[in-house]
Image (spheres, rainbow, N blue to C red):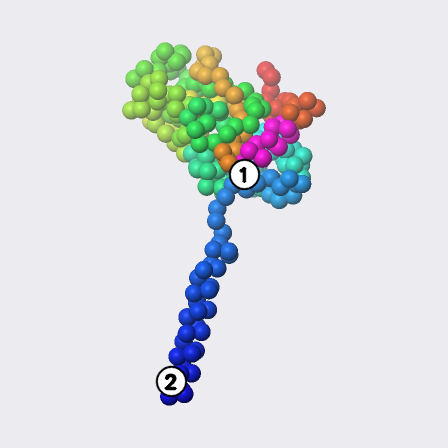
Amino acid sequence: MKKVLKLLSIIICASMLLALAACGGNSGSTATKAPDAPAEGGGKLIMGTNAFFPPYEFYEGTEIVGIDPEIAAKIAEKLGMELVIEDMEFKSILVALEAGQISMGMAGMTVTEDRLKSVNFAESYATGIQVIIVAEGSDITGPDDLEGKKIGVQLGTTGDAYASDDYGDDHVERYPKGAEAIVALMNGQIDCVIIDNEPAKAFVSANEGLVILDTEYLVEDYAIAVAKNNTELLDKINTALQELKADGTIQSILDKYINAD
């Protein structure tokens, strides 16, 4: 009998310990939240980007360089944080922000009403121009000639959104990277590519037989995206941007990568 009582006592104690452990389990959880900028600096500033958008972001060997990484590095320096760059598909950046996987999105990203529904944007740091790339000898001379054509775009970009609205979703071919759209154009699979002017110049320079039309398709402002619940970081980024504009740092970075001619 004593042995039975002792065994029951052990079982009851074990059950109580398991119950206590279950109640306290949440204290060790890793609930996802947007990375914050500590009030006194420190920590990591995680930048989500798509590193195939020269000169804003591109690979130099294994390193991601360009306008956005350099501006981001200056912002991180002012915030006393370590910059970490995460390369991902463009369409995944806002999703990663909302999930708290990155601190900010910076990828030649345009402020749009649709994007403002899910994230906040800091003040603009650069102006982008969407242009049309065609093969030499094409009968396309401007936006008015795109009706009924096959238009290549990078998935999730403003070129994607506006081309779909202007010419119909059925006429837009989407590619994860702008470079893939260029390959499709060169192979005759599409009639043109709509993309930002700066990467357009890089693509045309690297691929013989392509030209950029003189007529602009769209002019837009680029800005840094931040999660809706991270207003502290948004304020800090805006303050840093204002200082970097005032002392000429941002303009010098833009001039380094973009030829005024």
State which quadrant residue 144 falls in.
top left
- Which label was assigned to residue 4? 2
| Secondary element type, mark 1 | loop
The vertical placement of 131 against 115, above or below, is above
Q: Which residues are magenta?
A: 230-241
| Residues at marks 1 and 2, CA–CA distance in whole angstroms | 58 Å
Three-letter amino acid code of the residue under disc 1: Ser
Q: Quadrant of the N terminus?
A: bottom left
The residue where tag 1 is placed is: 103
> 10 Å neighbourhood of mark 2: few (<14), some, or many (≥20)?
few
State the residue at coordinates (46%, 19%). 130
Which quadrant is home to the C terminus? top right
Q: Which mark sits nearer the N-terminus, 1 or 2?
A: 2
Rendering quarter of residue 76: top right
Q: Main secondary structure of the magenta part?
A: helix
Residue 174 placement (x, y as % from top left):
37, 29
Residue lying at the far right of the rendered structure: 247
Could you say where residue 138 lies in the image, as x and y percent from the top left? 38, 15
Question: Viewer-proximal residue, 48 or 242?
Answer: 242
